[in-house]
Amino acid sequence: MNDRLPHEKGFHVSWDQLHRDARALAWRLDGMAPEGGWRAIVAITRGGLVPAMVLSRELDIRVVDTISVKSYDNQAQREAVVTKSPQEELMGDGTGILVIDDLVDTGKTLELVRKLYPKAHFATVYAKPKGRPVVDTYVTEVSQDTWIFFPWDMALQYVQPYRGKE
């Protein structure tokens, strides 16, 4: 029997690793833009902000906007709601827009945003199996029961080994 909490099967991502993975995402996206190129990047806040900055630099996309979607209270997922939308005149149906997030978990956030902008290209740095069908491009897949610890959520401290005490 395993007495660990679900989030204790963790994948810890450092700033360096996130930067490398976001650059790898840029390399995958290079050449995928529709005719005329990407018009803009829309970051899903808050997690998509850092990857969006890296993609903006790597792909030379100067227009960056945000859509704020709240779907978590700490580590508990709930119904996704839009709390801030990007510029309407920029978005249209999403054609030429690159929508970026750090992670697709169950896919609920991306499903909500895709309903609003059906022709946008959706990309995440990390993907879990349940959410993978709603993302167009991603870099790394992790198991559904893995909790990803992003660098903005972390502090340096001792952590017990996965299998228990030393």
Image (cartoon, rainbow, N blue to C red):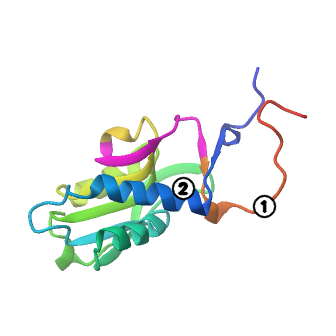
At label 1, the amino acid type is Leu
Rendered-image quadrant of the N terminus: top right
Q: Based on the displayed image, in which of its 4 quarters is residue 98 positioned?
A: bottom left
Q: Residue 136: within the magenta?
A: yes
The dot on residue 121 is none
Q: Which residue is mark 1?
A: 156
The dot on residue 72 is 2
Q: Relative to 28, say whether 82 is above or below.
A: below
User: For the magenta stretch, what is the residue range?
Assistant: 134-147
Q: Residue at x 21, y 59 (%)?
A: 120
Q: Residue at x 30, y 68 (%)?
A: 59
Q: Is residue 142 left or right of residue 152?
A: left
Neighbour tally class for label 1: few under 14, some 14-19, many 20 plus, Cα within 10 Å: few
Q: Based on the displayed image, in which of its 4 quarters is residue 164 positioned?
A: top right
Residue 162 seen in the figure:
yes
Marked residue nearer the N-terminal end (1 or 2): 2
Q: Relative to 61, say whether 160 is above or below.
A: above
Instruction: Name the spot of residue 74 as percent of width and height, x first.
Output: 63, 56
